[in-house]
Image (cartoon, helix red, strand yellow):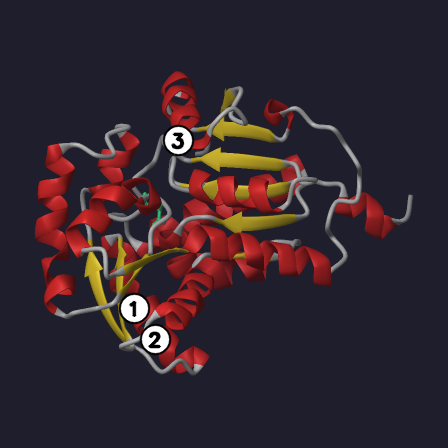
Amino acid sequence: MSEGSSLAELPIGIFDSGFGGLSVVRAVLDLLPAEELVYIGDTGRYPYGSRSPEDVRKFALQIGRYLADEIGVKLVVAACNTASAVALDDLAGDLPVPVVGVVEAGMRAAAKATRNRRVGVIGTVATVASGAYQKLPSRLGLDVEVCCAACPGFVEFVERGETDSDQVHVLAERLLAPLVAARVDTLLLGCTHYPYLARTIGDVMGRQVVLVSSAEETAFEVQALTASRRLGSNLQKALEPGDRLRAFSSGDVTWFLEVGRRLLGPELAEVRPITFD
Ligand code: DGL
């Protein structure tokens, strides 16, 4: 087997602070059926969104290093907008494998979807404070006006497995009001946890507003990268759903398996514990 093809058969590493990155896992599993994935949910240290940039950077580098050095993945996906917004350049500079983030892909898709050129972006406090999304239109040459809102509390609802309660609806009405008032016609879900709240968010924003999730766009980016670097798996394996994903959590693994399976599906067959200092 040549070096290129053996590298191609390594798994793809994906991480997030908790369950949110499973929205990216779902999209990658569906788009790339020959790939095997390793997921780390850092639930022992979530939420990242209220942490300092230094903490988020440290956690992202620890996990990226673990995936690259200990597991031996062929590429790392930072399936967390907070980590992507704060630490993508550090990860790309530090890791010996290619790194994919979730910030740019989502903005490109939102810019394609908008008709009135007004795009709303919702994310964690740390993501919005990083200014990553606000800088993107001029960096990517996109003719859109971006209106950002932080949504503290959304992630905690998802981590509790509570995705369509009255309480989350009330919170969404309050947090999304500025975006409704700004008449955005497209809303980018700039946190990988938020696709799990899509029904509530869609109800509050109204049917005329297109919701864009960075999960699918990121999967397309992974597909393009694996193709261009000849890293796509070529094995014709008949994998059972549970054999395609190895998952780790730094928090309560029983809870991770229960809620994660509800959010992701049968591919989450087992969750192993992991500890970071
Ligand atoms: N899912 C993550 C994100 O996309 C992190 C949420 C959090 O831990 O606060 O930002």
The residue drawn where x is 50% and y is 28% is: 248
Badge 3 local density, few (<14 within 10 Å), some, or many (20+)? some
- Disc 2: which residue: 135
Element on which disc 1 rests = loop
Tell me: residue 232, above or below residue 160. Answer: below
**Mark 3 belongs to which amino acid?**
Leu
> Which corner quadrant of the image does residue 171 belong to?
top left
Q: Position of residue 217 (x, y in %)?
A: 49, 57
**Mark 2 belongs to which amino acid?**
Lys
Q: Residue furthest top?
A: 254
Nearest to the observer: residue 111 or residue 65: 111
Residue 65 in sight in this render: no
- Disc 3: which residue: 263
Q: Is mark 3 within 8 Å of ligand 1?
A: no
The residue drawn where x is 18% and y is 55% is: 206
The residue drawn where x is 26% and y is 41% is: 155
Query: What is the distance, in whole Å, between disc 2 and disc 3 at their CAs?
Result: 32 Å
Query: What is the distance, in whole Å, between disc 1 and disc 3 at their CAs?
Result: 29 Å
- Disc 1: which residue: 131
Is residue 78 left or right of 155 when viewed as pictured?
A: right
Q: Position of residue 207 (x, y in %)?
A: 23, 55
The residue drawn where x is 33% and y is 51% is: 191
**Of labels 1 and 3, the one closer to you:** 3
> Does label 1 or label 3 sit earlier along the sequence?
1
Q: Are marks 1 and 2 in contact (CB under 8 Å)?
A: yes
Q: Position of residue 108 (x, y in %)?
A: 44, 69
